[in-house]
Image (cartoon, helix red, strand yellow):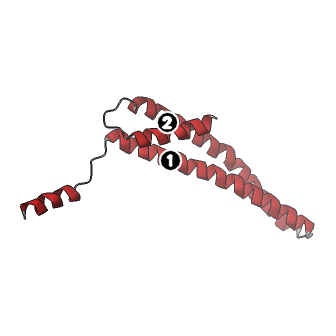
Amino acid sequence: RLQLLEFSKKMSKPKAESSADKKLKIQIGVCKRMTKEVASYEKEALQNEARIQKMRDENKDEYDIRKQEEVLQESYMMIPDSKYRLQQTIADLSTLVEDCREEPGLNPALLSEANEIITAFQG
């Protein structure tokens, strides 16, 4: 019965993550989210371009076309802003990796994932 109790205690306590691991996980998640955001705005701009062209081909109302062009311009304005914010998050991740590299108990898989993200962005 004592062995069962000890086993239960071991199973109920997850391995404690280091502070550096938590920070890396969060920053990696931010980088992934920002990458998706940039891709989403670029995709949206392409879809809006195609929608406008289709409206022109079908001789739709000029007012509707102008409104869609306004939507397209908004998408174009969001792309540079998103790319800038992505660059900032990659720079933050790079700084964090440098700061945490020698941290004892750092999860090597997280460090590897962070380095892959940094390398992919720089390449």
**Local SS, label 2:** helix
Q: Position of residue 26 (x, y in %)?
A: 43, 46
Residue pictured at 37% horizontal, 41% vertical? 107
Please give the count of numbered marks on the rendered protein.
2
What type is the residue that disc 2 sits on?
Asp
Residue pictured at 54% horizontal, 41% vertical? 117
Q: Quadrant of the N terminus?
A: bottom left
Q: Is residue 56 visible?
A: yes
Seen in the picture, residue 44 relative to 118 is either above or below; the reply is below
Seen in the picture, residue 48 relative to 91 is either above or below; the reply is below
Q: Residues within 10 Å of mark 1 (few under 14, many from 20)?
A: some
Q: Residue furthest left?
A: 2
Q: Is residue 89 visible?
A: no
What type is the residue that disc 1 sits on?
Val
Which one is nearer the viewer's eye here, 31 or 75?
Answer: 31
Q: Is residue 33 left or right of residue 66?
A: left
The numbered disc on residue 92 is 2
